[in-house]
Image (tube, rainbow, N blue to C red):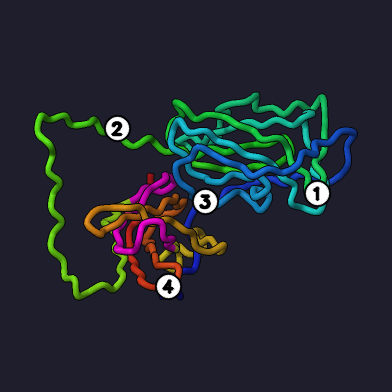
Amino acid sequence: MAVFFLAMALAIAAGCTAPAGTDNASEDISSVPVTSAALYRATINQPDALSGFVKMDTDIYNSGEVVEFTVINDGSGTLICAGNPPAFSVITQTPGGTWSTKMGSGQPDRAAGSALAPGASTRRYTFVTTGWEPGRYRIVHDCGIEREFLVRALPPATLPVTSSLTPVPDACPETNTTTTAPWIAIAEIGRPVAYQPFTIRGTTNLPAGEELVYTIFAVGEGDAGVSLDNQGSFRTTVIEGTCGTNTWEAHGEIQATGEFAIGIMGTDKTPSAIRKFTVIPE
């Protein structure tokens, strides 16, 4: 089953590179671990390799969560930056596929310049996504680095139920206690829409907190050339459920249409499951 875990089908957008050189001023702040108020950890495909210079602990946020990041020059050349210190803007992708400025000036301050030497890092940047619409966003940093992230809607709030009687928990159904083999199941996926974030859910009897490895890949050879990401598989964590049945979630976005499949397994390659689904046009 490990053979089909080839690549994650996520968005691949055009990026830009930053020129190497020197400048009169530089930002050289010691790197510190980036923390975030995000409720879970997930990654998406990025515009180019330089996107990894933007250090974030997740690429998917609920609306209202805090985004924190630092830019670290992991390359061998100096990055020339606009502004001293450099700033950033956030742009968002419209339904038509164009980009517009969400926050920031959208225009770097080229009246002043700075440089980011190899191994150096910027200060920590922070902003809040309160009121932001679900969709794709991109951080555009003055040092020529870009990184994309997704914002999704908050799950609906559940109001507490008041009762004068003490609630009696439902009894767990009887199960075959002679079978304890681990298993993973994938719920009905439906028909995700291309260019829009979607979630795949499932159940398992693996313990809460255990990691699962999943990959989404094109089924047809015609789709593989435009959608496969050769960077490998991604991970998710088992969430505690009830009656010995726990849950899991996988997140992604596919910028193509056609037949796809998700494969998921435990970190030791057992148990495993696979399920096909169809991505439809916008």
* Residue shown at the point (64%, 46%) measured from the top left: 15
Question: Which of 15 and 235 lies nearest the eye of the viewer?
Answer: 235
Tell us which disc is closer to us: 3 or 4.
Answer: 4
Q: Residues within 10 Å of mark 4 (few under 14, many from 20)?
A: few
**Residue 69 versus residue 274 in the image, above or below:** above
Instruction: Look at the numbered disc 1 and give the secondary structure of its residue.
Output: loop
Q: Earlier in the sequence, mark 4 or mark 2?
A: 2
* Residue shown at the point (42%, 62%) measured from the top left: 212
Q: Position of residue 94 (x, y in %)?
A: 48, 34
Evaluate whether residue 271 shows in this view.
yes
Q: Is residue 148 left or right of residue 106?
A: left
* Residue shown at the point (86%, 33%) measured from the top left: 25
Q: Position of residue 154 (x, y in %)?
A: 37, 35
* Residue shown at the point (49%, 54%) measured from the top left: 10
Query: What span is in magenta?
Result: 192-212
Instruction: Look at the numbered disc 4 and give the secondary structure of its residue.
Output: loop
| The label number, if any, that marks residue 157 in the structure image | 2
Q: Position of residue 80 (x, y in %)?
A: 81, 39
| The label number, if any, that marks residue 25 in the structure image | none
Q: Are discs 1 and 2 less than 8 Å apart at CB?
A: no
Give the residue pinned by disc 3: 43
Tell us which disc is closer to us: 1 or 2.
Answer: 2
Question: Which of 225 and 276 lies nearest the eye of the viewer?
Answer: 276
Q: Position of residue 274 (x, y in %)?
A: 34, 67
Tell us which disc is closer to us: 2 or 3.
Answer: 2
Give the residue pinned by disc 4: 269
